[in-house]
Image: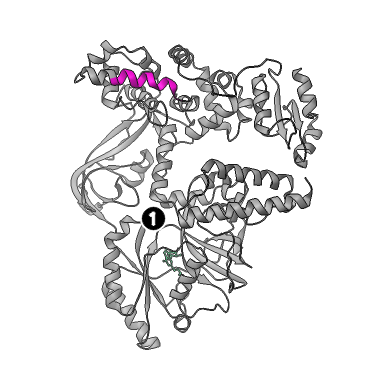
Amino acid sequence: MTLAEAQIQIAELTENANRFNHLYYQESKSEISDFEFDQLLSKLQELEQQFPTLAQPDSPTLRVGGIVTKSFESVAHQYPMLSLSNTYSEGELLEFDERVRKSIGPQFDFVCELKYDGVAISLIYENGLLVRGITRGDGVRGDDVTANVKTIKSIPLRVNDENLPARFEVRGEIFMPFKEFERINKEREDIGEPLLANPRNACSGTLKMQDSGVVARRKLDCYCYYLLGENLPFTSHSEALHAIKNWNFPVSDAWKTCVEAKEVLKFIEHWEKGRFELPVATDGVVVKINNLSQQEDLGFTAKSPRWAIAYKYKAEAAVTQLLSVSYQVGRTGAVTPVANMEPVQLAGTKVKRASIHNADEIARLDLRIGDFVFVEKGGEIIPKITGVDLSKRTPELEPLVFISACPECGSPLMRIEGEVAYYCPNVYGCPPQIKGRIEHFIQRKAMNIDSLGPETIDQLFQKGLVNTPADLYKLNFEQVSQLDRFAEKSARNVIEGIEKSKQVPFKQVLFGMGIRYVGATVAEKLAGHFGSLENISKASFEQLLEAPEIGEKIAQSIVQFFAEPRNTAYVADLKLANVKLEEEGGQEIESEKLNGLSFVISGVFSQFSRDELQDKIKANGGRLVSGVTGKTNFLVAGENMGPSKLEKAEKLGVKIIDEQAFLDMLA
Ligand code: IVH
């Protein structure tokens, strides 16, 4: 392909991808399947890699990430990012109205918006193109997080409009939607990673990640609320909001122009409850003077604009007594403290339990049984203890000491260096760990045995019928029908559900096996790369690292898993049970001619598609790796292959062969 041909193709693919993206995200329509869309993007990505000079700064491939920022550059804000003065009372709000009136006279409107609790961002556009995304930082300088910002699908990479200012800045709040926060935490729970504390922290942590590919997978979103620039063609803030909405910026509909203070109070009242329906945490209402020249007249103090004020809703908090702390042991053995409290009414529900994240949190709060504690409901679903009312503390209360033995099996607890959690090391003997592994195994994303639940698993375990997930396949109808409250029909359902699970694809089995850090996505990558459990179990640490997205922590955990004799028996049982331990399709074995050899393929081939060539390598016992290293045996080079791969292969002395030479190896 010539440069000119590539240019045309890239332009075409870009236009299509942008159109589909726009349809999907702005109009909630889709004209092609996710799969087709992914194909389109990977084609574009491949061309961009082959012809790096043609890669566009607004390419839709930037949405999926791939750029790694080693350290974020600190840059100065053109307009400082100020804060807002806060008020908690209607009285103070009326004083604000009064101050404004004194300063600019009685003729003015307000715009009321919600105050979003995320991470402030400044988005800079030049000639319609997003050139930089900068965090607030200290207000004067912030971090350049452009690559990460570009993965946020609602933020336009390019704005098309006839009257677009040559340079402008849009400010808004990046946030992690509640649903996404819950999804990620569920996934982290599944693989034994510590949970993210709340959506706000999760969002700011995500935005500072080095690998934009990871950022892309955590679906952050944004609400924009401020347009800045020189000589903008608008006279009011409401006009500017309409304009940026028209330019496809995400602007929440939760805003209103109000002509008098009474209306502002109504807005505040309306959203006090309504805000809980939004996808993002909010903690108040921002009241702004609408007219831009009036804003200018009012000006700024050193810290905040005089033309705006934030009314903060009172945090939903309550005081209650801490009665006891219980300790829960999870599937991975991690021990989590939970506070049991005198029941108290909070944000519409009765609350009697709160999470305390770990031992450090107990020490930080200096919690004592009998203390009166403040509980709040933030963005999280489970309320948390935010502090102790020391004025109510009586002298006899003693500091709470974290347990030193497992509450379930009595084993002395351990702490792993660098981790805050305490663990019960009795992996194969501690009941909640054993049952937890089985519960993990049967879940929908794994073996999908929905006729089983925690109670049945508990019974099966108590009766000594199951100890590992693989034991489920040894159960018979008689054993199940003897369980408490089991009619014939439900027993049959259980047996049928277990039988049916033998059909779930290998990647789900692998996820269900419960190897630490191997979540659903990692399992899919491993299954695709290695093709079978056999291959994964035999792979060395280095070979595991060659698989896409597998880092040292995961590789280490996999090696450890297969080194444990009990897991060898577990795997043998799964094999006997006939669950799928290999990828389906394209995996027929043709020969063992390429056994032990690793291949990188690059470019376009005449006799095969890339997929066919990959299948051919695997079918003959070879291994595919994504990047050239000193350990790679062959680089199969096609037409138009990327120059960097070629250069690297030459430098490292990796054998470079063409399609025909590859076929000759198999002959
Ligand atoms: S306007 C000069 N509008 O609150 C201030 N800010 O405490 C211009 N925030 O840094 C900001 N929602 O991160 C504005 N609707 C909204 C907002 C909002 C949240 C944040 C923003 C700002 C902080 C100030």
Judge from the rendering whether residue 600 lies leftward or rightward of residue 393; answer left or right: right
Q: Where is 122 relative to 503, above or below?
A: below
Q: Secondary structure at mark 1?
A: loop
Q: Which residues are magenta?
A: 493-504
Q: Residue 534: give x, y in percent of width and height.
A: 56, 17
Of residues 123 and 245, which is closer to you in this image?
A: 245
Judge from the rendering whether residue 43 lies leftward or rightward of residue 372; answer left or right: right
Q: Amino acid at mark 1?
A: Val
Is 495 within the magenta? Answer: yes
Q: Where is 16 relative to 269, above or below?
A: above
Counting the numbered discs, the total is 1
Is 289 within the magenta? Answer: no
Q: Where is 197 relative to 606, above or below?
A: below
Q: Please name the residue shown 50% across and 27% down the image.
A: 507
Judge from the rendering whether residue 514 lies leftward or rightward of residue 456; answer left or right: right
Identify the residue position indicated by label 1 in the image: 280
Q: Is residue 413 visible?
A: no
Task: Locate the C terminus by quadrant.
Answer: top right
Rendered image quadrant of residue 104:
bottom left
The structure's colour scheme is one colour
Q: Is residue 383 visible?
A: yes
Q: Residue 390: give x, y in percent of width and height.
A: 25, 52
Q: Please name the residue shown 79% across and 30% down the image.
A: 658
